[in-house]
Image (spheres, rainbow, N blue to C red):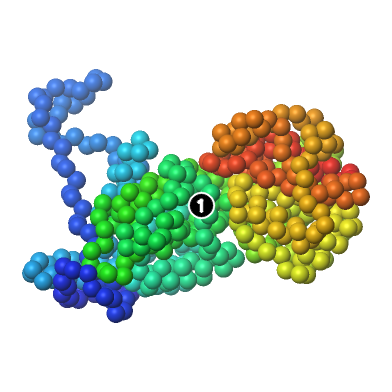
């Protein structure tokens, strides 16, 4: 990052056109108020419980410090600005709206019934522990740069369960493009993608599917991008400004600014805090290392191999979920099971020796012609394709149905009847338990719901529109559409045993 410098600029108190990124370097908010001093006004007496040292009349009462949930990252340059009326103020790239985090945490605290605190953070001395600081907040309008060591540290922080939240308070294209490029460099195996409106982020406290942009009335939906680590958005990037809305203000000095109104920004900010808290356990659980089998070194075996399809979308939704299922399969059955997953790419890897393929995701994905041909041959050769909708997302559901039409154009998914042998292969499964979101949306649904395609009398494509793998993993995934752990594990074991015996 660049060294801190001091420059002198002068601006009018009216909006003006932007010529280059330096014209986005303007004050956007007021300095946060100092914390109030709390002085005891009572007489000297020992507070309960006894024994205790009496407080003097002038001693300050120290309230317990609320847990730190966010660190606002210091970066870039500082400047001294003089307005047309002679008023001077200091600004910095990282802190153009100084009260944004303070006001956000006040609002989130009122809504969630919890108090949180924050600190400024220097990346050079940051501890990197998401248990101490669950959210790192990057704010700014100009181009942000990182060196390789900083990107490695940020990657490690996210992979351990941390959340990076990146916002240009004025919706600057310079900050947005640079932070997006940096995050894609830090996570080359993932890519930033639009977070769909049915994602838990938009519903974890407030339902936010419609918003307002004061200077763009033609836009009415939120636009956030994320980088998924497992099923969790480990990086969230806001293309349009949120920070000033956190601070109950608009953006007056930049004509080209695109930002959310105060109500929309406040709701999205509250959801950010709730999401970070709600998915913190998921982040820690999915951060545990998992061994994959080596496809190239794989030797012929009579063990069951859990082969999982790698695709262009978020393909590894619940790290550790499959391993948990395979361990239970060993305990509850006599099946010989390898505990290592094997990642394969149909069309590139030879999948002819596998009898079982697993496909999961969170959003859109597409299969190329070679992958389609490979999967068609796999199914014709009596292989079983199991598809799981991670978190029960609509976008992935649409992609599954579209891609299956490429593989089996003459066939279509149909509901699997409750009497089908798949529900009796190990456990006799009648009623199951779904997560609260499913129960609320479909209170009549008591039995397992699969869809499938039958080939030559056997169920060769098994699709669960409701998430099974989150239940295998065991962690609570707020607002997921899926099965509770016990039902998910029993269904998963039945699926594997059915695939092994048919």
Residue drawn where x is 38% and y is 73% of the image: 174
Measured as percent of width and height from the top left, residue 285 is found at 57, 46
454 up-or-down from 9: above or below: above
Quarter of the image for the N terminus: give it.
Answer: bottom left
User: 24 or 114: which is nearer to us?
Assistant: 24
Task: Label 1: state its secondary structure.
Answer: loop
Residue identifier under label 1: 197
Residue 348 drawn above or below residue 288: below
Is 344 displayed left or right of 35 in the figure? right
Residue 288 visible in the snapshot: no
Task: Pick out the residue farthest to the right.
Answer: 456
At x 82%, y 33%, the residue is 419
Foreground: 203 or 150? 203
> Which of these two is toward me, 342 or 178?
178
Residue 487 seen from this side? yes
Task: Classify the position of the C terminus by image quarter.
Answer: top right
Q: Is residue 280 left or right of residue 132?
A: right
């Amino acid at each position: 990052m660049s060294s801190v410098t001091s420059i002198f600029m002068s601006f009018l108190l009216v909006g003006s056109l932007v010529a280059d990124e330096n014209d986005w370097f303007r004050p956007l908010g007021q300095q946060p108020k100092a914390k109030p001093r709390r002085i005891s006004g009572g007489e000297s007496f020992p507070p309960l419980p006894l024994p205790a040292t009496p407080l003097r009349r002038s001693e300050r009462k120290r309230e317990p410090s609320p847990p730190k949930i966010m660190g606002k990252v210091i970066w870039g340059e500082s400047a001294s600005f003089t307005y047309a009326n002679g008023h001077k103020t200091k600004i910095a790239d990282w802190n153009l709206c100084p009260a944004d985090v303070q006001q956000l945490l006040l609002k989130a605290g009122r809504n969630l019934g919890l108090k949180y605190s924050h600190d400024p953070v220097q990346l050079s001395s940051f501890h990197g522990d998401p248990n101490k600081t669950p959210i790192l907040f990057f704010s700014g309008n100009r181009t942000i740069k990182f060196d390789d060591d900083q990107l490695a540290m940020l990657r490690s922080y996210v992979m351990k369960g941390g959340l990076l939240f990146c916002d240009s308070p004025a919706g600057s294209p310079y900050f947005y493009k640079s932070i997006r490029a940096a995050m894609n460099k830090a996570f080359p195996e993932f890519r930033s993608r639009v977070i769909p409106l049915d994602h838990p982020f938009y519903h974890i406290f407030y339902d936010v599917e419609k918003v307002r942009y004061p200077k763009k009335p033609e836009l009415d939906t939120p636009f956030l991008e994320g980088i998924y680590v497992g099923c969790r958005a480990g990086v969230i990037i806001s293309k349009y400004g949120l920070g000033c809305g956190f601070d109950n203000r608009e953006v007056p000095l930049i004509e080209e600014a695109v930002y959310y109104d105060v109500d929309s920004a406040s709701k999205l900010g509250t959801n950010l805090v709730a999401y970070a808290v709600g998915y913190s356990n998921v982040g820690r659980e999915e951060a545990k290392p998992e061994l994959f089998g080596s496809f190239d070194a794989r030797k012929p075996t009579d063990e069951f191999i859990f082969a999982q399809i790698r695709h262009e979308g978020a393909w590894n939704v619940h790290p550790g979920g499959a391993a948990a299922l395979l361990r239970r399969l060993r305990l509850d059955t006599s099946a010989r099971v390898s505990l290592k997953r094997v990642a394969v790419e149909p069309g590139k890897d030879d999948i002819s020796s596998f009898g079982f393929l697993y496909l999961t995701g969170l959003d859109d994905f597409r299969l190329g012609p070679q992958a389609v041909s490979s999967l068609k041959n796999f199914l014709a050769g009596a292989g079983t394709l199991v598809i799981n909708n991670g978190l029960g997302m609509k976008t992935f559901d649409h992609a599954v149905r579209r891609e299956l039409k490429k593989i089996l154009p003459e066939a279509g998914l149909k509901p699997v009847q409750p009497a089908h042998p798949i529900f009796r292969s190990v456990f006799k499964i009648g009623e199951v338990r779904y997560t609260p979101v499913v129960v609320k949306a479909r209170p009549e649904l008591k039995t397992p719901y699969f869809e499938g395609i039958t080939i030559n009398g056997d169920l060769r494509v098994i699709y669960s529109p409701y998430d099974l793998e989150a239940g295998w993993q065991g962690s609570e995934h707020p607002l997921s559409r899926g099965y509770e752990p016990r039902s998910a594990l029993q269904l998963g074991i039945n699926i594997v045993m059915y695939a092994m015996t048919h």
